[in-house]
Image: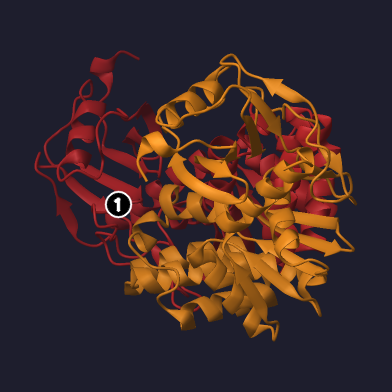
Chain colours: A red, B orange
Amino acid sequence: MSAAAITPDWIAVDRGADRLRVWAMQGATRLAQVQADADINPHAPDGFDQILRAATAGWTIAAGTPVVACGIAQSPQGRAEAPFRAVPCAPLGDPGAVAPTAGGWRVRIIPGLSQSTPPDVMQGDETRIAGFMSLNPGWDGVVCLPGTHSRWAHVSAGEVVSFQTFMTGELLALLATQSVLRTTVTGGDAGAETDAFDSGLADAMARPERLAARLFGLHAADLLEGTRADAARSRLSGLLIGAELGAAKPYWLGQDIAILGAAEPARLYARALRTQGVPATVADPDRMTLAGLTAAYRAMTPAT
Amino acid sequence: MSAAAITPDWIAVDRGADRLRVWAMQGATRLAQVQADADINPHAPDGFDQILRAATAGWTIAAGTPVVACGIAQSPQGRAEAPFRAVPCAPLGDPGAVAPTAGGWRVRIIPGLSQSTPPDVMQGDETRIAGFMSLNPGWDGVVCLPGTHSRWAHVSAGEVVSFQTFMTGELLALLATQSVLRTTVTGGDAGAETDAFDSGLADAMARPERLAARLFGLHAADLLEGTRADAARSRLSGLLIGAELGAAKPYWLGQDIAILGAAEPARLYARALRTQGVPATVADPDRMTLAGLTAAYRAMTPAT
């Protein structure tokens, strides 16, 4: 399909923490997908607008074509631009007011969800959850969303009842790239040595308070004996996912679990749950995002 | 005292993870102290030599003046250049072979200590422990050394029996400066809101596996309600020190504790221990380093 043929009904946008993707859509059909220019700061006053214009430059877009966006939208002060909706509630609410942008885009932003006790927020995962629910009507259970911030959400009777977010992915990235463990784990594959992953997982679940000591132990073991990067990286993932699994037990114990995550983390979380005797189904998060954005688009345009 | 008058018997060096200090010494008396030029890479082949020359340029140094150094000395591959000594052992061993440097310095390096189970290492803290022991002969108990990597060491009958290192300080620094918590805690003082510190400490000791969720909770609470940076920074410290205290319980329970740490972390660790009914004495770590280096110098030059 040549670029000239791309004439979307509507445009779908996922604003992730570290990437922004834009799809040209015709109903539920994906015509084209582009990844936004990473050089444009999406948090600048007209950054989102600039990104949209650059990403869609090759498409033929009619005036008034709706744009439906989910994900993180923060001002430089770190505040969300759209109010959160408090759980328990359906994952998709009224997409609400159109946020007009400098370029005349009519962007509708799917509001994130919040929880007051314990304080928690999600921006983007509510859309993935909605996508999963739209593809699996009537499903009750727990959705696990691994990522920079991994998240467990209890879904029942079409609503998100409660959720809990963990900084696991961000901790992993900081430790692997910025800490004293850098040289020990660089180049290692977290899924390569399952024994190291499993023993890290079991150690962390048994004695989660020892995490900071076990992290230094990875460095010490490498200094004293030399360790394979694959084994160290696998154990590091096992330790951090194990601590999370210990804390998220009220979410996964005796529940149906759906993991919406990219290939590697999804595989590790599924393995971790399997060691606890809990089966999980895995679904592609990008597909769920697009299904959720499509559900939101349909809800706001009943005639379509 | 003018620079021309500085004629040291020997030179003491502490090679920390993030700074290198050099003292001109006459017996146990400090004549002068300089902080090394941070622009010189101490891990370059002749970096240490360059640093010594630059730092001591104003001093009058006789040929053969001994240099006694402790701390981290790593090649670019991350391996220690001097072999570790395995605990249980006295904190100061034979300072061993002279490491000749390009500039003709006769540098003696105090070997670090290692432990095989669980794997652990220290490089520098053995000298601070030796300094404390030289100033407190016959003391038995547990030495706590807060820092980038905080460490608990059990000292008995003149030997380091066992020790455990935690990445607490490094985790704190990464979270406060590189993570999503950056905007929430920047400018906050970890000692400013003792209630927030104490509740973080208690929460982490009670349910250490929830650490990664509580970290995200700091971010969510700030987004939803806005939080004071002092309170968030205090709670962050409480959470991380609380997890460490939970794991280090076999070290501090029913023991005499000496904290060798800089003012702020020492105050926080002392407060944390006090909440557990454990009193601790606090000693200045730089003074302990110099006392330990002096003890090492005396051991290698019995005639002095």
Q: Is A16 placed above or below A98 here?
A: above
Q: Is B15 placed above or below A82 here?
A: above
Q: Is B144 placed above or below B91 here?
A: below
Residue A294: x %, y % from top left: 39, 46
Q: Quadrant of residue A152?
A: bottom right
Which amino acid type corresponds to the residue marked 1 in the rendered image? Ala
Residue for badge 1 = A73
Residue B217: x %, y % from top left: 48, 67
Which chain is mark 1 on? A
Residue A246: x %, y % from top left: 73, 63
Decide if residue B273 is in sight here: yes
Q: Quadrant of residue A41?
A: top left
A134 horizontally vs B293: left or right: left
Residue A167: x %, y % from top left: 54, 55
Which residue appears at 19% of the width and 61% of the height? Answer: A97
Are there few (<14), some (14-19), or many (20+) residues within 10 Å of tag 1?
many
From this viewpoint, which residue is outermost toward the bottom?
A: B277
Which residue appears at 84% of the width and 52% of the height? Answer: A275
Q: Nearer the viewer, residue A270 or B22?
A: B22
Decide if residue A253 is in sight here: no
Q: How many marks?
A: 1
Element carrying mark 1? loop
Q: Nearer the viewer, residue B53 or A52?
A: B53
Q: Nearer the viewer, residue B50 or B182?
A: B50
Q: Is A281 placed above or below B199 here?
A: above
Q: Quadrant of the C terminus of chain B?
A: top right
A40 horizontally vs B93: left or right: left
